[in-house]
Image: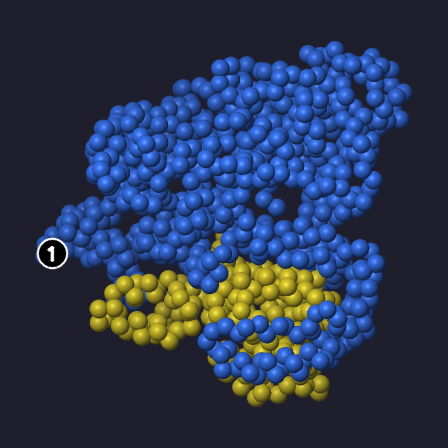
Amino acid sequence: MTDGDYDYLIKLLALGDSGVGKTTFLYRYTDNKFNPKFITTVGIDFREKRVVYSTNSPNGTTGKAFKVHLQLWDTAGQERFRSLTTAFFRDAMGFLLMFDLTSQQSFLNVRNWMSQLQANAYCENPDIVLVGNKADLADQREVQEKQAKELADKYGIPYFETSAATGAQVDKAVVTLLDLVMKRMEQCVEKPTADAQNTDAASKLTAAPAAEKKCAC
Amino acid sequence: MAKKKEALNLSFLLEHEREMILSVLQKDEKLRKREEKRIRKLKNELLELKRGSRRSNSEQRECGVCLRALGLILQRGSVCDDCKRRVCSFCVAVSPNSSHSKCTVCAKTAELKVVTGEWFLEERAKRFDRVTLPSSDVIKQSILNSPPESAQRKVYQSRTNRTGTPQPERSPTPQSEKSVGGRSLGKKKIIKSLAVESSGRPTTPNNMRPQPDRLSAQAEGRKRPDGAESVYSFHSSDSIADKVCGGQNRKDSATPSIAVSRASLSSDRSRSELDLSNPGEGFANDSLPSRCHSVPGLNDAESDEDIDALLSAHYKTSRSVGSAQSVSSLNSMMSVYSETGDYGNARVSGEILLNISYSYKTGALNVLVRECRCLATGDERKQRTDPYVKTYLLPDKSRQSKRKTSIKNNTTNPVFNDNLRYVVSHSQLETRTLQVSVWHHDRFGHNSFLGETELTFDSWEFDTQIEEWFALQPRAEGSVDSMIQYKGELTVVLKYIPAERNLSLPLDQIQVKKGFLKGKKSITLPKGGMVELLVKEAKNLTAVKSGSSDPFVKGYLLPDDKKSTKHKTAVVKRSVNPRWNHTFTYCGLQHTDLDSVCLELTVWDKEPLASNVFLGGVRLGAGTGLSYGKEVDWNDSYGEEQRLWQRMIDNPEVPQECTLMLRSSMAKRKA
């Protein structure tokens, strides 16, 4: 893990209310283990994981595989660390916005977190995945899937119900976010080319999706 | 300046929290270092590729990359979308969407932008154009700058945390600040009403999992059973966290009088150094003591802009492609050059013919600057170009590494045939980069930059000769590791003799240990302990003249920067591996002083007729950043320097030998 033998360094960040399970979620993702104890994160922490990411070329076949080094920032949900944690928003390329499915309040706060992100992330509409955690605690559930899904749709972001305890959907959520970031990265580099020659008929095809894409550049 | 604006007030952090956060930040710094190294490697590859390619336009019937001739009908090649050069079919990169064609150079440049994460920095720059520091550094700075809370408040804070009541002075939900842009616009109202609703309620209560667990976890403190990496790094002995908390503990101790080295010789302060600071720069910080005149690095742009330079290195890969570049990075690179130059205006064109050879026998790198052709015009108004060529053997950007050719009058195709010579071992050379820049000499105004090229030697067969045309590039790569360049190492032996022991020692025994060259020191022994420093030897110092230097070591016991604590060794003639075996003795040091003083050792090359040349230095101390309760920038020892000092304190009367890496600059380390 300590060598520099990777193709990309991607920095993701988990945020959300205190106690929604950001740390355990990341621990599950990186080490595939579960720690049921609640240990409040002091300010900020991060974990790392090396993954292989393969692109899909247009004709459907699997393209090149890249080694991606993930730096997963874990932030304290506690209010008193807020100024510190938001300072880290601008260094992250993608975000795991988490709430607790057994806590209506944590879900309501998603909107606040969202505006925090929009104000402090590297651009106004960064790549975000909404994550409802603790899906295993079905009997204590306070947030319905439909509710959360609607909110995610409103923001135009993917939604996953995960469980750090069982590991369900944890990988899926992170991989989806990684995918979004990698796509944006390509767009950001491709676009200047498309702008440069919009007289060309062929480039119009590439310019069209560029107009609706999320990148604010 | 930007640093100050970004700083946060983090004084609410408890001491153990500060430690934990700092250890995480340190872990992050390690990761970023590794990333920088990776990026540097990638950039070298691009440079390699660019080196081969030429500047030409689409009218020319030759490939812009490999110079293969192109036909009018057959073998026409295709035009690169990015650089508009016509390239042959071998030099077109295969891109996934066939509508684009790019030459290999542009493809590689684009690829680099992705893999180095530069795309991200560019995106972010559109939003926060003032962001220059990674947040980790901002936070670190903020933490180190803000004192922790008093004990009373601590108790209160930790209690409130435990019971989960909201902090009275803060609103419990994330502040919905002015919502910016796109998606949020329509929801502004909702957000507002929500914020009101939720702010009436405590933060945490119902979103916790088992409550008792939480309590016990709190009690457990930082023992984290999940085995997070940060726990391990926390224990590493050189963590800044230790340093900081150490500093805090000592802060309250009463300020003893500065009792240092009464037994020392005075000698003239060498006039050496003044010229090292750039005349145009001005002193950035007036509050610095006069000492800064004597130590290079404090004044020059490095201290303020090193982070800038590091960061801007990220931005620089694609300058030649014409993407938006931050002006600040240009400015920060100016400090490399001794004269202020004008980079902005002159267009860059043309190429330079260099003949490069290395002689094992003499250990000399010969850079024969033959000629340039098609240079840009240096002075557009007068339509005049008086070119000369300047080289540096990076990462050394000092005067010692600068070479210049003669100035040719009014020509854009100058023929120089000037040989620029460097004496450097081949193993050293492998780590160096030759930076060749062309300048227009303006007798009255600023010299203007006409282009440059960089060559690395890591893959070069030293016994072969290169004679090649190199395309001139706009201002490019800043060497990322300029701050951590290798300047050689210094071996010292430190010993602390506490007051009790000191008095019981027979007088002559102490006398013997003082430098024999300057043995006639005062015999009246002051009270207090004594620090003995044996300056043993140095290795691999920078050679200033024809393969060697005349090095000596100068020592001050800060905060006293006057003659009273100044010691010098003898000059060892013509050696880059000198052995001095010279002892500096500092008396009157109480145990409590040891955290507040710092032994600054600098190595110099003695120049009989000119200013002495700075070769490197170390600072031995506790690295607390404090001196008798005051914040100081020189108590910044770290790593081995700091450990050695600690070992000395922990093992009184036991000599502690240590070999230290020389710092390349005595500027404040970037915190």
Q: Nearer the viewer, residue B358 or B529?
A: B529
In this picture, residue B14 sits left or right of residue A83? right
Picture coordinates of residue B158, whole percent (x, y): 80, 64
Give residue A213's quadrant in the image.
bottom left
Q: Nearer the viewer, residue A1 or B376?
A: B376
Instruction: Name the residue carrying label 1.
Output: B74
Picture coordinates of residue B388, whole percent (x, y): 30, 31
Seen in the picture, residue B657 relative to B37 is either above or below; the reply is above
Picture coordinates of residue A100, whole percent (x, y): 66, 78
Chain B painted colour: blue
Chain A painted colour: yellow
Residue B18, can we see it?
yes
Q: Residue at x 11, y 56 (%)?
A: B74
Give residue B490's quadrant in the image.
top right
Seen in the picture, residue B561 relative to A11 is either above or below; the reply is above
Q: Chain of mark 1?
A: B
Look at the numbered disc 1 and give the secondary structure of its residue. loop
View extreme (left): residue: B73
- How crowded is the residue under tag 1: few (<14 C-alpha within 10 Å), some, or many (20+)? few
Q: Residue at x 34, y 45 (%)?
A: B344
Q: How many marks?
A: 1
Could you tell me which quadrant the N terminus of chain A lies in? bottom right
Picture coordinates of residue A31, whole percent (x, y): 63, 64
